[in-house]
């Protein structure tokens, strides 16, 4: 009999790694997000896992991530920060450093594509406005949205986040490509039920 849809995480993991290793993994990582973020090398070091089981675990998380992308029957309309956050939440969940992404949109705010621009904190990144908008022009995008993650879990924008946003808004105005929002993804907590913030909603979209 295959795994039940009602099985808990440890039971599902035991199909890939065996029950003893699954117990050790859940004790060590606690939940699926830190387990998904663990490197292939780190997983191999866990007692009872080894190379083949580590590969199976990493493959399972990769397949889950791809399933999320594949489940969109047509290009979604991304006209709210919540819709943007929902699109990119799973992609960003696995990142342990900041990743800045650009979402390309057509005139109806439907998704054209997503490009990873850079990784690292925004105050250490050289964000090249030319590269952002050259990619937008190449994809015939009418608008873009910026998205990046805060691995700390707190989506509160930094001064660097705000400066990068305003620089790109000004560059977009010259090229008549609208920057519709900058969404920062974090993690939900009991005190913070929403795991994202919108710089537009926070009032930072003036130049």
Image (spheres, rainbow, N blue to C red):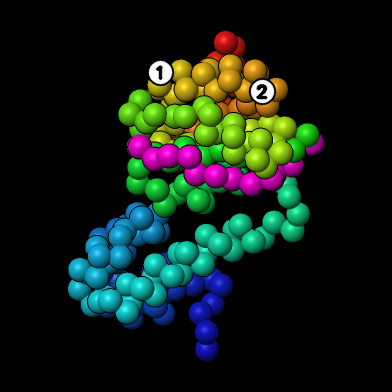
In percent of width and height, residue 188 lies at 46, 40
Depth order, front residue of 84/113:
113
Image quadrant holding the C terminus, namely: top right
Give percent across and percent down for residue 100.
47, 37
Using a 10 Å C-alpha cutoff, classify the residue at mark 1 as few (fewer than 14 neighbours), some (14 to 19) or many (20 or more): few
Residue at mark 2: 175
Which residue lies most toward the right here? 108
Residue 202, located in which quarter of the rendered image? top right
Q: CA distance from mark 2 to mark 1?
A: 25 Å
Depth check, front residue: 8 or 156: 156
Q: Name the residue located 64 percent from the left edge and 61 percent from the top edge.
A: 70
Which residues make up the magenta segment? 108-120
* Picture disc at residue 59: none
- Give residue 138's quadrant in the image: top right
Image vertical order of residue 54 relative to residue 206, above or below = below
Extreme residue in the top direction: 207
Tell us which disc is closer to us: 2 or 1: 2
Helix, strand or loop at disc 2? helix
Look at 49% across and 44% down and name the residue there: 116
Q: Most prominent secondary structure in the magenta stretch?
A: strand
Circle 1 sits in a helix, a strand or a loop, which is it?
A: helix
Q: Position of residue 119 (x, y in %)?
A: 39, 40
């Amino acid at each position: 009999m295959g795994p039940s849809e009602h099985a808990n995480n440890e039971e599902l993991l035991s199909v890939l790694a065996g029950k003893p290793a699954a117990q050790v993994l859940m004790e060590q990582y606690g939940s699926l997000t830190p387990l998904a973020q663990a490197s292939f090398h780190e997983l191999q070091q866990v007692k009872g896992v080894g190379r083949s089981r580590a590969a199976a675990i990493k493959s399972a998380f990769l397949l889950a991530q791809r399933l999320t992308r594949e489940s969109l029957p047509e290009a979604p309309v991304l006209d709210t920060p919540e819709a943007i956050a929902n699109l990119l939440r799973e992609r960003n969940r696995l990142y342990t450093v900041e990743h800045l992404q650009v979402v390309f949109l057509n005139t109806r705010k439907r998704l054209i594509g997503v490009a990873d621009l850079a990784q690292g904190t925004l105050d250490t990144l050289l964000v090249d406005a030319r590269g952002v908008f050259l990619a937008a022009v190449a994809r015939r995008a009418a608008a873009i949205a910026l998205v990046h993650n805060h691995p700390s879990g707190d989506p509160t924008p930094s001064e660097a986040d705000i400066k990068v946003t305003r620089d790109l808004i000004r560059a977009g105005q010259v090229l008549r490509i609208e920057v519709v929002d900058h969404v920062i993804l974090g993690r939900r907590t009991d005190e913070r039920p929403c795991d994202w913030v919108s710089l537009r909603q926070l009032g930072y979209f003036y130049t």
